Structures are given as C-alpha cells and as structure tokens.
Image (tube, helix red, strand yellow):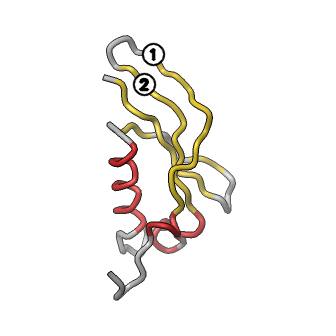
Amino acid sequence: MIVIAVSIRDKVSEVFGQPFFVQNIGTAVRSFNDEINRESPDNMLNKHPDDFDLYEIGQFDDSNVELKPNLIRLICCGSDVYRKKGVN
C-alpha cells in the first residue's frame, strides 16, 4: 500500500516536525484539525494555530520499502482549521 508522508511546519522556529504517514490527504487534514483544536495547556498547536501548517512531503510504498520524496506541497494552514472557543 502506498501511504502519504506529511509533516507539520512551525513557521516561528522555521522547522518541519517528524513526518507521519496517512492513507490519504483527508485523514491528514482530519488529524491536523483534531490536534489544532485539542485544548490542553501543553498543546502548542492549539495555543498558536497561526504558527503551524500541514505539508505533504512524499510517499511510502510498504510493499517494496520505497520512499519517494515529493515536491513539498502545502495542504492547509492551522488558522484555516482552528475553531475559536464557543464557535462551531
């Protein structure tokens, strides 16, 4: 199965986080959305949603262990998926 490699970029520190793998772009957006909106005192993504963006960075084929880098592509911005308290 070919899965998509994605990474969250911190615009303030100018670094990409550890890549993670998802079945498709929709599941990547859902995971990013969930984390941006997860309220917790130690959740930097929730505290500073404007500072984080989600990128597609490659693909991984688990049948032949092939890792293919892609052109880095912005999927969505933290500010696009952040829901303010009390607003649905």
Residue 60 falls in which quadrant of the image? top left
Q: Which residue is mark 1?
A: 66
Q: Position of residue 18 (x, y in %)?
A: 50, 42
Identify which residue is drawn at 48% across, 21% down: 67
Image height of 32 relative to 20, above or below: below
Question: 88 and 21: which one is in front?
Answer: 88
Identify which residue is drawn at 67% across, 62% down: 12
Identify which residue is drawn at 42% across, 34% down: 4
Please name the amino acid that badge 2 sits on: Phe
Q: Secondary structure at mark 2?
A: strand
> How packed is label 1: few (under 14 Cα within 10 Å), some, or many (20 or more)?
few
Question: 22 and 46: which one is in front?
Answer: 22
Q: Position of residue 15 (x, y in %)?
A: 64, 49
Q: Which residue is mark 2?
A: 60
Q: Is residue 22 left or right of residue 8?
A: left
Question: 41 and 88: which one is in front?
Answer: 88
Please name the amino acid that badge 1 sits on: Glu
